[in-house]
Amino acid sequence: MKSLYNLLQRVKPHFQPGGKLSALGSVYEGFESFLFTPSTTAPRSGAVHIHDSHDSKRAMIIVVLALLPCFFFGMYNTGYQHWKAAGAVDFPFWELMAYGFLAVLPRVVLTYVVGLGIEFIAAQIKKEEIQEGFLVTGLLIPMICPIETPLWMLAVATAFAVIFAKEVFGGTGYNIFNVALVARAFLFFAYPAAMSGDKVFVSSGSVCGLGAGVDAVTCATPLGAVATGTPVSDLSAWDAFVGLIPGSFGETSVICILIGAAVLLLSGIGSWRIMLSAVIGTLAMGWIAHTFATDLYPGSMFTAVDHLLYGGLAFAIVFMATDPVTACHTPLGKLIYGFLIGVVAVLIRVYNNGYPEGAMLAVLLLNAFASLIDFCVVRANIARRRARLTSKK
């Protein structure tokens, strides 16, 4: 690594103002700070500063590491669902993993090329450093989308989300909506036929000679089946907990999501207040919907725990709701924010038969109200302190 560092230092003058490659200065800075901790994080004189290697890029890398269990299981489950839909009896582990890897690889590469390309261009135009937030977003987008999403749709959605949900607000740290969820929402509302139904969640074609083509998919997604009042008899709660069910690429395994949650909590990046309150909100609203079930809303056949086992709600709670940029920042605000996400997600799932998955809309809706919740919490604290001072006088 020392030789690489020395090489970067030798070419650095070419990328600084006045150098022949100064127009690519932000590209060089992004590459250098990704590999090494910058030595200019604070002034060297005039004040006492504590230098720490834990910057926002390292935080993003930890989030990526937390996502890897879900990503690797998504590779296996993609192959597993394909083999199952094709009527296979044997499920060879490494072939399933290879199939899933080759199915998702073009999508991951595409989102990073499109998203980072736009951010590179924006950084050059604004003469700013390249932001690191897309390290996570570029992996999240293919993980929360159906595996059969056409590549060109994914490219359009990624470009839309980066430009209109991030760059127009000022870049990383200024966006009010979760960028990955905006991409998912754009796909759902712009191309609903390609984002709903059962076939989009199961890869139908062979990849590089692995697996046979699937002409007709017979396995229904649990949420889609329940929304239409159709019981899913061949799936158990254990299947849902492990993740061997149809769904978006990285959202199905609760076990892997819990591992990711542990990484975020131990590293201090994820908020336990948001996670805990969102689970409580989900269970509370899920219990109410199940207890007061009606024939008009077949989704109410789900128990409270089922809402956390099926669909993408658990994934959204851990990796979307806890986004430090778009979530609340006050301790009480985080509790309110998380609780409302769980409540709204279940409300949408149960009482809107046309849209069985409510996690995406719940998080985006509460993103819009996060600042208002914090404002109300702060004003309430000020009012309480003023009342205490008044009473003492």
Image (cartoon, helix red, strand yellow):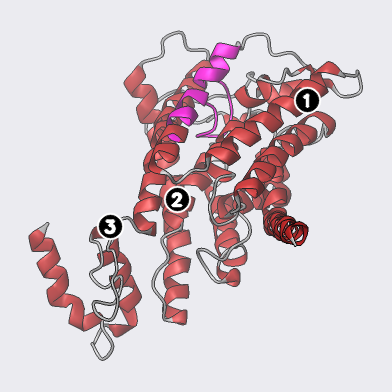
Depth check, mark 1 against mark 3: the one in front is 3
User: Which residue lies at the image location 39% right of the left edge and 73% below the top edge?
Assistant: 129
Crowdedness near tag 1: few (<14), some (14–19) or many (≥20) residues, C-alpha within 10 Å: many
The amino acid type found where label 2 is placed reads: Val
Residue 309 image position (x, y, % from top left):
61, 22
Q: For residue 266, what is the image quadrant?
A: top left
**Residue depicted at 61% across the width and 49% down the height:** 181
Circle 3 sits on which residue? 53
Secondary structure state at the residue bearing disc 2: helix
Chain part drawn in magenta: 237-260
Location of mark 1 (residue):
227
- Residue closest to the eye, 218 or 3: 3
Quadrant of the snapshot with the C terminus: bottom right
Residue 312 visible from this viewpoint:
no
Instruction: Check if residue 161 falls in the magenta segment.
Output: no
Quadrant of the rendering where the N terminus is positioned: bottom left
Is 253 contained in the magenta span? yes
